[in-house]
Amino acid sequence: MKKLTISILLLLLFSASIYSQKTDEVYLKSTTLLFYENLSGRDWDSIPEYFTSGAKLSLIRINPQTQKEVVESLTPMQFVKRSKDVLAKLSIFEEEVLESKFEVSKNLAHGWIKYKARAGNEGSVFEWTGIDAFTWIKVNSEWKIQNVVSNKE
């Protein structure tokens, strides 16, 4: 009887853990979609709210002078300022999530986001796809982004 009770307790704990993980995955997926909507809508005031105080956004890009890949890391505020400056000149900017996958382990989560983007002005619109890798951490029961690494395909 004691073994049966222990087995039932372990099963209940395991089930609760899986339920919690699925709930977190649903939350992370919907919050990530909202993040991209805010980004596309140029809602700059909302962007820093998604991040921890020490967060970084890292962009892998080609240096136009050397033609070599470089990594540029920005704080959320630096990212917002740069994006505002660059996108102020463009009438079209949108990013859409094509696919997202999340893996959650207690207070740590990783999201792999495939997106497509469009940017430019009428008659001159550039389109591309890319992958954003998100690292989320849960602090005081609240999920925040710690890191994003972005890479165009």
Image: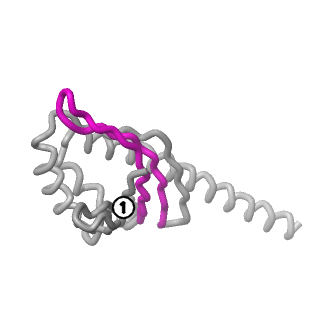
Query: Which quadrant of the structure image shows residue 30?
Result: top left
Q: What residue does disc 1 label?
A: 148
Q: Locate residue 119 relative to residue 131 in the image: left or right.
A: left
Q: Main secondary structure of the magenta part?
A: strand
Residue 41 at x, y = what percent?
22, 37
Q: Nearer the viewer, residue 52 or 40?
A: 40
Say if the magenta span includes residue 144.
no
Residue depicted at 85% across the width and 70% down the height: 2
Q: Residue furthest right?
A: 1
- Number of disc labels: 1
Q: How is the image coloured?
A: one colour
Q: Residue at x 41, y 54 (%)?
A: 132
Identify the residue shown where x is 30% and y is 64%.
Answer: 67
Instruction: Residue type at mark 1: give it.
Output: Val
**Residue 124 lies within the magenta run:** yes
Which residue is most to the top? 123
Would residue 90 be found to the left or right of residue 149 on screen? Answer: left
The furthest residue to the front: 66
Q: Residue at x 41, y 59 (%)?
A: 134
Quadrant of residue 37 in the image?
top left
User: What stretch of residues is rendered in magenta?
Assistant: 108-137
Is residue 78 rendered to the left or right of residue 50?
A: left
> Left or right: 34 with respect to 81?
right
Identify which residue, 22 or 125, lies in the foreground.
125
User: Taking 122 as reference, is 29 above or below it?
Assistant: below
The relative height of residue 144 versus residue 45 in the rendered view (above or below) is below
**Crowd tier of the residue under label 1, counting other residues whose Cα lies within 10 Å: few below 14, some 14–19, many 20 or above:** many
Viewport quadrant of the N terminus: bottom right
Residue at disc 1, secondary structure: strand
Q: Position of residue 129 (x, y in %)?
A: 40, 44
Residue 105 picture location, percent across and down: 55, 65
